[in-house]
Amino acid sequence: MEKALWYLLAGTRGGVNRARIIRLLDERPRNANQLAEALDVDYNTVRHHLDMLLDHDVVETGGADYGKLYFLTDRFERHREAFERITDNI
């Protein structure tokens, strides 16, 4: 998971926005539209970042397709310290 976090957050251009998404989801579950509004980022951009985070088991979904909520995974929670270290460097 730590390697995936380095890639997602520090190895690509979208790392800062992905870190911002993770921080917002840490506060409470949200859907893609709520995240786009809170970040003042295009909805499709947020969906792209969420898909990347889903593919690497950082977030998971709950609910129906429309308005489904995103949550941080238990696996991510076990590696939160790595997330904090990485975000301190970006």
Image (spheres, rainbow, N blue to C red):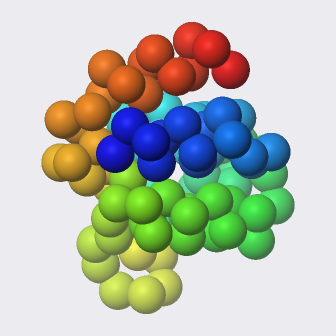
Q: Position of residue 11 (x, y in %)?
A: 69, 41
State left or right for residue 14 relative to residue 25: right
Q: Quadrant of the C terminus?
A: top right
Quadrant housing residue 40:
top right
Q: Residue at x 74, y 46 (%)?
A: 12
Q: Position of residue 21 (x, y in %)?
A: 56, 44
Q: Residue at x 33, y 70 (%)?
A: 61
The reply to whether residue 17 is visible in this rendering is yes
Quadrant housing residue 42:
bottom right
The reply to whether residue 33 is visible in this rendering is no
Q: Position of residue 73 (x, y in %)?
A: 25, 52
Q: Residue furthest front?
A: 3
Quadrant housing residue 57:
bottom left
The total of numbered circles placed on residues is: 0
Q: Is residue 70 above or below residue 37?
A: below
State left or right for residue 13 relative to residue 64: right
Is residue 44 or residue 89 the one in the foreground?
Answer: 89
Q: Is residue 3 above or below residue 68?
A: above
Is residue 7 or residue 35 the one in the foreground?
Answer: 7
State left or right for residue 26 relative to residue 6: left
Q: Is residue 10 above or below residue 63?
A: above
Q: Residue at x 47, y 76 (%)?
A: 67
Q: Residue at x 62, y 14 (%)?
A: 89
Q: Position of residue 56 (x, y in %)?
A: 42, 61
